[in-house]
Amino acid sequence: ANGILNVSAEDKSTGNKNKITITNDKGRLSKEQIEKMVEEAEQYKAEDDEAKKRIDAKNGLENYAYNVRNTIGDEKLASKLDESDKKAIEDKVKEALSWIEENDSASTEEYESMQKALEAVVNPIMTKMYQAAGGAGEMPDMSGMGGGAAPGGAAGGSGSGPTIEEVD
């Protein structure tokens, strides 16, 4: 019943009967081995989840920093930024990127803290620039930057200025 193939043979002239069951035990894991593997998988699940969160935080910070750097490198935007504001953003982005390289095994909280510090420099400058542009749609879309400012167009709307949505 548990075999892969059951074969029976009968010699009609002599009446001899023989049965054989072909199984595939070679290379199979025993029930104990399987249970041990499942227990180990459950044991390491929390560690794997924590590692995933840490890597996601690192990638989020790195993506945000590169997106900010590319955004301020855009000629249309660069001309609207004060030189001091542009320098402040560039310095903070460089600091964040070098920090990522030097702290490859930092904790999730450290990565999130660094991203918040970068956002604290970038968001007010971008908001100020957007407000100075009058919300006329000249501001680049920052919503794909992994957090921070995502200015919504308030042009022609309620006139209350841009909407800033903070995403954790």
Image (tube, rainbow, N blue to C red):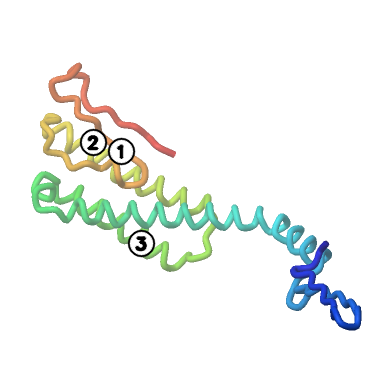
Q: Earlier in the sequence, mark 2 or mark 3?
A: 3
Residue position marked by numbered label 1 in the rendering: 149
Specify the quadrant that holds the N terminus. Answer: bottom right
Q: Is residue 100 left or right of residue 110?
A: left
Mark 2 is surrounded, within 10 Å at the Cα level, by few (under 14), some (14 to 19) or many (20 or more) other residues, namely: many
x and y percent of residue 123 in the render?
A: 29, 40
Q: Is residue 116 left or right of residue 1?
A: left
Nearer the observer: mark 2 or 1; the answer is 1
Q: Secondary structure at mark 3?
A: helix
Camera-side residue: 164 or 93? 164
Image disc number at residue 97: 3
x and y percent of residue 57 in the render?
A: 46, 52
Q: Secondary structure at mark 1?
A: loop
Marks 2 and 1 sit apart, C-alpha to C-alpha, by 8 Å
As displayed, is residue 64 above or below residue 23? Answer: above
Mark 2 touches mark 1? (CB < 8 Å): yes
Give the total number of marks visible in the rendering. 3
Mark 1 is surrounded, within 10 Å at the Cα level, by few (under 14), some (14 to 19) or many (20 or more) other residues, namely: many
As displayed, is residue 161 above or below residue 102? Answer: above
